[in-house]
Image (tube, grey):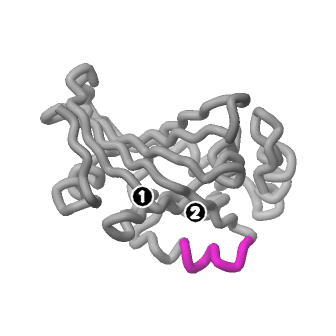
Amino acid sequence: MGKVYPEIDGRLRDFIAAQPVFFVATAPSGAEGHVNVSPKGMRGTFVILGPHRVAYLDYHGSGAETIAHLRDDGRITLMFCAFDGPPKVVRLHGRGSSVAVTEEAFADRLAEFPEPPDVHAVRAVITVEVERVSDSCGYAVPLLDYRAERDLLLTSHSRRTADDLVAYRATKNAASIDGLPVF
């Protein structure tokens, strides 16, 4: 049923671009610590940069596991599911890195997104060097109807100043749930 592909080709690119939500999985190195899986979405926050390179905008949130795990060991998997149309699941396995809003390279990374939503509350750009591209059937993934984007993340952060976001990172995003440093 499943297939491994040499790269993100045109057909896979179209499938990935059509999905309104994707999932990010990371884990710390070693046998201890928590595996983290996070849903991501919002149009304009994900970009395919090449046949083996993708990136997404990472907004301030309740945790910062992905950044901490990438700093620790770099492993990351992105998963895209078809919730309508033919069943399909695509996984991108690779090595990720983050460039924080405070880093000099941030503006260059942000410029790679042709149509991002409001970027006021972006805390980092996550880039993945894709090492393995695969799909599977997705026969058990339910059919769901997409209604609309949620704007709660953007509106909640629109009330925060740049200084508020610095304080947010320092207090709420300083360490992962396992105590790994984030920024």
Give the CA separation, mark 1 to mark 2: 16 Å
At x 67%, y 46%, the residue is 69
At x 27%, y 24%, the residue is 141
| Nearest to the observer: residue 93 or residue 139 | 93
Q: Is residue 6 above or below residue 90?
A: below
| Nearest to the observer: residue 68 or residue 101 | 68
Q: Is residue 62 above or below residue 163?
A: above
Q: Nearer the viewer, mark 1 or mark 2?
A: 1
Q: Residue furthest front?
A: 30
Quarter that holds the C terminus: bottom right
Residue 152: x and y in percent read 55, 42
At x 72%, y 73%, the residue is 103
| Nearest to the observer: residue 20 or residue 29 | 29
At x 69%, y 36%, the residue is 30
Residue designated by label 1: 130
Magenta span includes 54: no
Magenta span includes 104: yes
Residue 26: x and y in percent read 57, 41
Give the residue type at disc 2.
Answer: Val
Residue designated by label 2: 125
Dividing the picture into quadrants, the one containing residue 48 is bottom left
How many other residues sit within 10 Å of disc 1, few (<14), some (14-19) or many (≥20)? Answer: many
Residue 145, numbered circle: none
Residue stretch rendered in magenta on the structure:
103-109
Give the residue type at disc 1.
Answer: Val
Residue 182: x and y in percent read 76, 51
| Nearest to the observer: residue 26 or residue 40 | 26
